[in-house]
Amino acid sequence: MRLLTKTSRLLLGYAIVVLLVSIPLFYFVIEQLYYQDIDDALRLRKEELTIRTKELKSDRDVALWLAMDNDVKISSSAPPLRDSIYPKLYQDTLAHEMEPYRELATALQVNHKIYHATIRRSLVESQDLIVGIAEVQGILLIILFIGWLLINRNISKKIWKPFDRIIDWLQNYQVDKEQSLIYPNSGIVEFDQLNRVVNDLVSKNKKTYLDQKNFIENASHEMQTPVAILQSKLDLLLQSQGLTAEQAHHLQSSYEVIERLTHLNQSLLLLSRIENQQFPDLVEISVKATVAKVLKHLEALIDDKPVSLNVELHGDKMLHGHPVLIEILLSNLITNAVHHTSANGYIHISNTDHCFLIENSGTPLPFDQSKLFSRFGKQNINRHGVGLGLAIAYEISQLYRLKLNYQFKKHMHQFSINF
Amino acid sequence: MKILIVEDEPELLQSMRLFLNSQGYRCEVAETYETASEKIIDDIFDCIILDISLPGGNGFDLVKLVKKLKKDDGVIIVSAFNELDNKLNGLKLGADDYLAKPFHLAELSARLHAIIRRRNFSGAEVFEHNELRVQVEDKMVFVHNKALLLNKKELDLLLFLIANKKRVISKSAISQHLSQNESGYYRGYDVIYAHMKNLKKKLTDAGCRDYIKTIYGVGYKLDCDEATD
């Protein structure tokens, strides 16, 4: 949920509650105020009647007065001790409907006689008025809240602009590319602070990255130069006249050791470069084309062994990555399969839009499956390579968020990459 | 042929000098940036073999110097910085080739040979020995004047043997040569055996004598002398 949505939702919720409570409350308050007004009027009327009725001297006068004023009634039932006002419904003589009234019951002395008198006042028009006022108030409130929400939304959007800029900038940031720092002046203290912190972090990151890169380069240099010297001496030795079979044998062993050393060194450097994400130039690479390329390289090896190879390439899945790494990923898996298939064994490679699968016949792993992708985790590693091939493949799959899995099923080793 | 070798590691420098001397190259050497730049300014070389990290300066600057002086010297960069950036950077500056340490002297010699060939023979070099004729630049192989079809690896292998003819090339060097530009591939000898077997078979099937000698399981040699008798 966006921060703006969240605050807006809270505000909206609050506005709805306030509206729901305020409209009936409003109605009730206005109604009460109106009743008070009516009641005051009724009391005033009573005062007036008390004075005026003194002028009625005969029963005829009284009857006439009662006929004239429909809202005052007197009866000879026991007069109330105290005045009281209450709501009451009366049948309307014209519309034949029950209509609401306020009524004051009091004791009234007319023509030397005390009567039980009631004075009433219709509420029909006043109710329309109250409803009207409440409606107008409600609408005003709604308009007020909507306007407030819109303005708030608008301001928020403007306020968050510097933040969006930082996010944009961070998203495009690559530690290995030269990039100017983010401009720290947004006019809002909190965002300026954020910009400064981001700039600090980025500068520190950059330094660490460069240090690490330097270290890798230095390590590579320091290790490869002695190896280069050693190898050049062997090359010279090989040219010497009268080389005996025994000397040649020793030379060969030395060459192999140097190659392992070189391969080991390069593999380790490759691993750390992958971990440091030093393969930044990403492009779209066809799995199908890469598999075909790798197979072409390994053709002689496959034919020579021999293993029977069955390749089914469907679809044309493109992976987003560095061409060298994608090639290493696939070639390490394929080379691994070729090496660990015994002569006259069987390799099956298939590729769809969702999955790359390579299977080779063989016996179950002689070590724990969890060690398969670890570095140097395996026994008899030095028969082929240095035991880092699958670790490198795994590292590359992690880098590109591909799922590299292994299982042993029906006498087949099965590696799959799910895209 | 006059070569300048710029390398700060004396032992490696000596190895390169000895190996190239024995192939008939005249070698000048320089161990520092200063001496190297002096020699580049004062003299003309067919090719300069150049290490990138040098005491007193950077090998890339020497490449720039060669280009600034408008000299025609070929340049091979030799560097332990086995990274694509360095390679691209070197080639962009005008170096002719790039070789990552550790390399085999046979590989260096083959690259050197190729650069000098391109510069001096305008690419028309032909290797001819009895019934075998190879037009190196066109990559055409003839046995008894009949064209022989080889695949890329077999051709690479044959050309590599020719570039280092009469000397022993280790299997290790062949394996490195065949797998260049194939980062991360497993370099096994079984691959070489397979290619070598196929190459020899194609040559002998076409009626060519077997000039490729195996040297005690450590390497191979294209032997042009013994087979001529």
Image (tube, coloured by chain):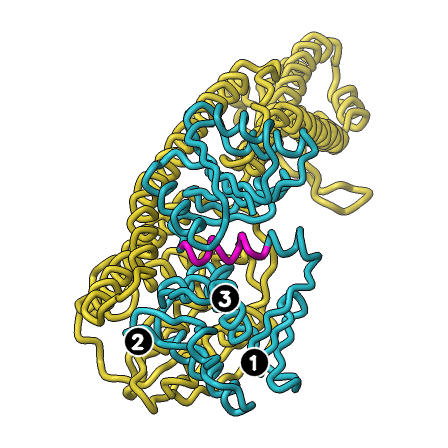
Disc 2 to disc 1: CB gap under 8 Å: no
Q: Earlier in the sequence, mark 3 or mark 1?
A: 1
In this figure, which residue is indicated by the disc labeled 2? A407
The local secondary structure at tag 1 comes to loop
At label 1, the amino acid type is Asn
Q: Distance between the residues labelled 3 and 2?
A: 42 Å
Indicate which label's residue lies in the foreground, 3 or 1: 1
Q: Tell me residue A68's x, y (percent).
A: 81, 25
Please tell me which residue is depicted at 51% across the width and 39% down the height of the picture: B4
Measure how far apart labels 3 and 1 are at the Cα level: 19 Å
Location of residue A177 by image quarter: top right
Q: Which residue is drawn at 41% across and 89% down?
A: A308
| Chain of the residue that carries numbered disc 3 in the rendered image | B
Circles 3 and 1 on the same subunit: yes
Badge 3 vs badge 2, beta-carbon distance below 8 Å: no
Chain B: drawing colour: cyan
Q: Mark 1 points at which residue?
A: B130
Disc 3 designates what residue? Answer: B160
**B228 lies above or below B74:** below
* Label 2 to label 1: alpha-carbon separation: 56 Å
**In terms of secondary structure, where does tag 2 sit?**
strand
Check residue B56 for magenta coloring. no
Local SS, label 3: helix
The image quarter containing residue A110 is top right
Q: From the image, state the color of chain A.
A: yellow
Q: Where is residue A172 in the image (x, y as percent from the top left)?
A: 58, 37
Of all residues shown, which one is farthest toward the front? B229
